[in-house]
Amino acid sequence: MAVLPDEGTVVDLGSGGGVPALVLALACPGLSWVLVEVRQRRAQWLATAARRLGLGDRVTVRTERAEQVGRGFWRGGAAAVTARSFGPPAVTAECAAPLLERGATCWVSEPPTAEPARWPHDGLLLLGLARRASGEPPGWAGLDLIRPCPDDYPRRVGIPAKRPLF
């Protein structure tokens, strides 16, 4: 993906079967990847696949909730975040924003009939995000971190889905 940085760490939320993260890890040798997958079996599969693909030195698999990752070591350290089928827009934004370094972008795979209203300006701004004005590849939404995400986010595990911000 031409919009990813040349170097740094990318966090993939809800990595599941490894698409797009493992494919992008192969295509972008200058990047390190943190794959976040809460399901133990899938996380084990991802770790095995990364080793077999020769990516073991650049891919880390975290078997925990995205809310926990956003409060840990990777907070504010991601050059980019990717998300495909992770969750509704409010949940994805709340879990991604704390991970991004200032000026970095979260790339979210969008459904074919996605409406721009899915990403309300005021809701994103609460998290320090803004929808990218241009340069989005087809089928993707770009959310730029324009100011640090407030320390209040992400909220406790499960709360972003139970009480979405927008």
Image (cartoon, grey):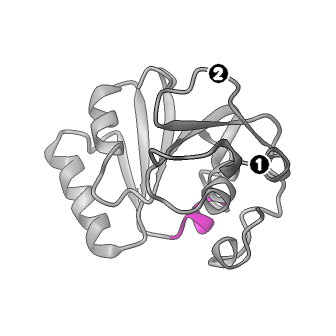
Q: Quadrant of residue 91?
A: bottom right
- Residue 64 vertical position relative to residue 121 in the rendered view, above or below: below
**What separation in Å lies between label 2 and label 1 (alpha carbons)?**
16 Å
Q: Position of residue 163 (x, y in %)?
A: 73, 76
**Residue 134: numbered disc:** 2
Q: Quadrant of the N terminus?
A: top left
On the image, the x and y values in percent for residue 69 come to 58, 61
Where the C terminus falls, by quadrant? bottom right
The residue where tag 1 is placed is 120
Residue name at image x 28 percent, y 38 percent = 23
Q: Can see residue 99?
A: yes
In the displayed structure, would residue 60 be above or below residue 161? above
Nearer the observer, 8 or 134 = 134
Nearest to the observer: residue 71 or residue 110: 110
What is the span of residues highlighted in magenta in the rendered image? 65-70
Based on the picture, tell me whether residue 69 belongs to the magenta stretch: yes
At x 26% / y 73%, what residue is drawn?
41
In the image, what residue occupies the spot 60% across and 57% down?
Answer: 92
Position above or below: 151 against 80:
below
